[in-house]
Amino acid sequence: MLARLTRKGAPDGALDMMLEIGDSVMTHRRQYPVQAGRRTVIDLLALDPLNPRSILFQLERLKAEIGMLPSVGAEGHMSPAAKEILQLNTAIAVMEPSDMTAQVIDDLANEIGGLYNSLAKAYFG
């Protein structure tokens, strides 16, 4: 949804709608003394490590949770899921709002889905 509502050519009001969907209207007003813009919406909903509704915050949390799972594979080595979340988390943590194109956000969604598959295979399959 973030990719669709922040892309070029999105309908008028799409950024405000994304803030509503992300339950972040008040947070946006508090952090950014400007009207919602693509950069500020993406910064808040994708890249803000302190916003519980941001992608980065959720990836940080997921990384911590995966780190507590029992190791799968060789002793002392990270599990494939732990490696995937670390790579994904690091890639997002160093991005700027201008880096977050609709394609990058779509790819991120696919990578998160792949992470789910890795977890299911390792621990439930």
Image: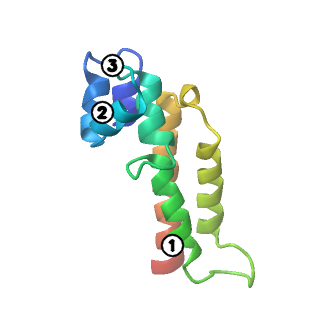
Q: Position of residue 49 (x, y in %)?
A: 51, 49
Q: Nearer the viewer, mark 1 or mark 3?
A: 3
Residue on which the image places disc 2: 18
Which numbered disc flags the more N-terminal residue, 2 or 1?
2
- Mark 3: few, some, or many residues within 10 Å (few <14, many ≥20)? few
- Distance (Cα) linking label 2 and label 3: 11 Å
Name the amino acid, label 3. Ala
Label 1 sits on what residue type?
A: Lys
Coordinates of residue 89 in the picture (x, y in percent): 59, 52
> Residue at (46%, 62%) from the top-left corner?
116
Q: Residue at x 46, y 47 (%)?
A: 55
Q: Earlier in the sequence, mark 2 or mark 3?
A: 3
Is residue 30 among the parts visible in the rendering? yes
Q: Is residue 93 above or below residue 64?
A: above
Residue 20 lies, with reference to residue 83, above or below; the image says above
Q: Earlier in the sequence, mark 1 or mark 3?
A: 3
Which residue in the protein does label 3 denote?
10
